[in-house]
Amino acid sequence: MATRATLPRAIFIVLAVLMAATAFDGSVLRAAPKATLQEVSEGLTCQCGCGLTIANCAHPNCGFAVPLRREIQGLIDKGMGRDEILMYMRHKYGEKILSAPTTEGFNILAWVMPFAAILAGGALIFFAMGRWRGAPRPATESPEPGAEPFDAELRRRLEQEVRNRL
């Protein structure tokens, strides 16, 4: 028979289990989706010189991609996930094997610099256009009414040369 002190504890435990059961969707117990050869090999660059990923290497008998595909399939069969295989290959071959740079350390510049260069170029163009347009020039002082802006002799010679050329 339950005593008065253990009854609230039992109710608390039952309520906690019910709340956990409703909040828990089973995702922890579900296995992560099995990595496929295609998705893993798209994350790795072929080292034969073609510049493509392992999945897309155009050489049918590539000395690098074909054996690596077999190795990747073996790792998948052992139960390794995509990230684990990529880290294993990174450790084995170095950073150059990854088809995209990691977002850590010095490699962060590979992600940031293109955007920074575009922003800097846009700002440079914006400010240059503003300077080129410039502020309106102050109005020059107009000559006094009736004052001749040119020398009369100079004007006469200019008109004469224009008439002679026509």
Image: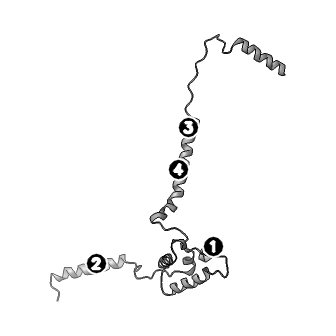
Tell me the element at label 3: helix
Q: Is the Cβ of the residue at disc 1 closer than 8 Å to that at disc 2?
A: no
Q: Position of residue 2 (x, y in %)?
A: 17, 86
Q: Earlier in the sequence, mark 4 or mark 3?
A: 4
Q: Which mark is residue 120?
A: 4
Q: Earlier in the sequence, mark 2 or mark 3?
A: 2
Q: CA distance from mark 4 to mark 2?
A: 56 Å
Q: Quadrant of the N terminus?
A: bottom left
Q: Position of residue 37 (x, y in %)?
A: 56, 81
Tell me the element at label 2: helix
Residue found 55% across the figure and 77% down from its top: 39
Mark 1, other Cα within 10 Å: few <14 / some 14–19 / many ≥20: few
The residue at which mark 1 appears reads as: 49
Q: Indicate which label's residue lies in the foreground, 2 or 3.
A: 3
Q: CA distance from mark 1 to mark 2?
A: 59 Å
Q: Earlier in the sequence, mark 1 or mark 2?
A: 2
Q: Earlier in the sequence, mark 4 or mark 2?
A: 2
Mark 3, other Cα within 10 Å: few <14 / some 14–19 / many ≥20: few
Q: Amino acid at mark 1?
A: Gly
Q: Amino acid at mark 2?
A: Ala
Q: CA distance from mark 1 to mark 4?
A: 34 Å
The residue at which mark 3 appears reads as: 131
Mark 4, other Cα within 10 Å: few <14 / some 14–19 / many ≥20: few
The residue at which mark 2 appears reads as: 16
**Front residue (pair 2, 62):** 62
Q: Position of residue 68 (x, y in %)?
A: 57, 82
Residue found 58% across the figure and 18% down from its top: 141
Q: Amino acid at mark 4?
A: Ala
